[in-house]
Image (spheres, rainbow, N blue to C red):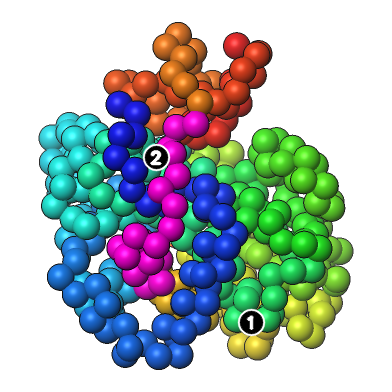
Amino acid sequence: MADSKQHIHLIDLNDHPVSWWNKLLSLAHEIRLNPTLYSKACEGKIMGTLFYEPSTRTQMSFQTAMLRLGGTIIGFDNPATSSVAKGENLKDTTKIVSGYADIMVMRHPVEGSVKAAALTAECPVINAGDGGHLHPTQTLTDLFTLKEEKGTLKGLKIGFCGDLKNGRTVHSLIKAMLCFKGTEFVLISTPALSLPAYIKDMLSAAGVPFREADKLEDAISDLDVLYMTRIQQERFASREEYLAQKGAYILDKAKMDKAKPDMIVLHPLPRVDEIAIEVDDDPRAMYFEQAKYGMYIRMALIYTILRGDGTASKLIKGREHKHTVCSNPACITHKETYLPHYFEGSGDILTCEYCDNRTLI
Ligand code: CP
């Protein structure tokens, strides 16, 4: 079942070199300035969008991106209207659609699901969010916003605030920003919602300075970027656990008054209550522009992948361990039980190839 055909997938941005990201950022800039030059760039191509989980921005910006490139789209935004409702497994649905389309974009609530689909897909697959794991095209959106608005990706002090445990956009962006010189992080969360240990370990291994804080008002004053996130109700085991965290962080005008005049506020959206509406009128509030930047970078991404410009990286770098079970209950291997158990590493600790969770054996 290992990936025999080598397509240029985007499962994890860090599978690709930074030079490839930079090319995408430059192309997105050019498309933003001259969109009509690209209006026929993907004529005759079809994009499949499989959204097993709700989405506004990612789904519609991908669809708009393809339409603005002259291509067409197929897909579903509610699995209940597809044969998933009859019990069709992930492999069959995605294998079929990937045979109809030239490129497939997929969002799914389970971690590692998009890589699982890519293993048997017949076209390039783009991860549009897999549970609490990764969201690489949001990361491209964030990088593009930073590049356009701050003029550089180097030397930025970025505060992440809110649900750092479940926020896949946070995980993806931190992993990406590790690659840029001079990055510093301030991780603002309650202990229950702190960043997963495997990402903190990455920060330590990379020698990137970071500190943890519990009060936004104390941490905001020296940030270049504040990345707010929603407390992700859908990822909690119970409503009681969610309610214990809800409203923990709210960015309002009083807190913005403590921030630097050139700090920018990003948020992947949707927001619930973590940014007061009054902040929207502050010129430093950049989250609506950020969502629009997402369309341009997705145009660049679709165009680049369909041209075959990039490296078809191996999906599986380790090997199958038949009798080892991933210790992450949210991993796709527990739901789609036919999937081979692929792990990287050796010795007592193995890393699941689908969800990146470390399992002690
Ligand atoms: N940022 C983001 O992923 O938004 P949607 O859930 O609306 O796609």
Comparing 355 with 162, the one in front is: 355
Q: For the residue carrying disc 1, how many other residues have a C-alpha within 10 Å: few (<14), some (14-19), or many (20+)?
A: some
Q: For the residue carrying disc 2, how many other residues have a C-alpha within 10 Å: few (<14), some (14-19), or many (20+)?
A: many
Q: Which residue is mark 2?
A: 115
Q: Which residue is mark 1?
A: 149
Q: Which mark is residue 140?
A: none
Segment colored magenta = 299-317
Residue 272 located left or right of residue 79: right
Residue 149 located left or right of residue 299: right
Q: How many marks?
A: 2
Inter-mark Cα distance, 2 to 1: 32 Å
Residue 149 located left or right of residue 305: right
Q: Position of residue 155 (x, y in %)?
A: 79, 68
Q: Which residue: 68% across, 41% down?
A: 199
Label 2 element class: helix
Q: Which residue: 69% across, 70% down?
A: 153
Comparing 161 with 184, the one in front is: 184
Residue 163 appears in the rendering: no
Comparing 235 with 155, the one in front is: 155
Q: Position of residue 25 (x, y in %)?
A: 53, 73
